[in-house]
Image (spheres, rainbow, N blue to C red):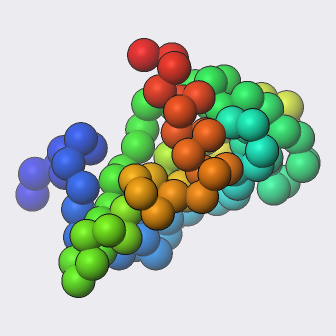
Amino acid sequence: MTEPDPTNPTDTALGEVVGNLDAEGDGGQFRAVDAGRVQCLTCRTEFDASLLGSDEVTRLEGASDPSDMVMVVLARCVSCHTDGTLVLGYGPDATVEDAGVVLRMSSRY
């Protein structure tokens, strides 16, 4: 079986992607907050998205509605070092918080 191309969106279910990462030991969770910042839901530390330090991103699009665009980012907390997932909307339906994080992540490249 070939590995999926991370630059191309897939029709894989969001729960499957997150479940696979959880099974690999990346069970922490993160969320986007104001001003391009990310919050670790383990220790509640907030940090700039440019510090995520991971280039592992899986983009997903809904099979029935391609505007359902989300990405799953493998993240590590800068404070407690928990590994986990950050699920972000992107594209025209992204929240302001999600878009801010995507923009800050992009500024690393």
- Is residue 81 shown left or right of residue 83? right
Q: Position of residue 31 (x, y in %)?
A: 70, 54
Quarter of the picture containing the C terminus is top left
Q: Position of residue 45 (x, y in %)?
A: 88, 41
Residue 49 drawn above or below residue 44: above
Residue 40 drawn above or below residue 49: below
Q: Position of residue 21 (x, y in %)?
A: 49, 57
Is residue 39 something one can see in this rendering? yes
- Is residue 109 shown left or right of residue 34? left
Residue 14 drawn above or below residue 82: below
Is residue 86 something one can see in this rendering? no
Residue most toward the bottom?
Answer: 64
Q: Nearer the viewer, residue 13 or 83?
A: 13
What residue is drawn where x is 24% and y is 55%?
9
Residue most toward the front?
Answer: 92
- Is residue 27 shown left or right of residue 1? right
Residue 20 drawn above or below residue 32: below
- Is residue 65 shown left or right of residue 81? left
Q: Position of residue 4 (x, y in %)?
A: 19, 51
Residue most toward the top?
Answer: 109
Quarter of the picture containing the N terminus is bottom left
Residue most toward the left?
Answer: 1
What residue is drawn where x is 73% and y is 42%?
38
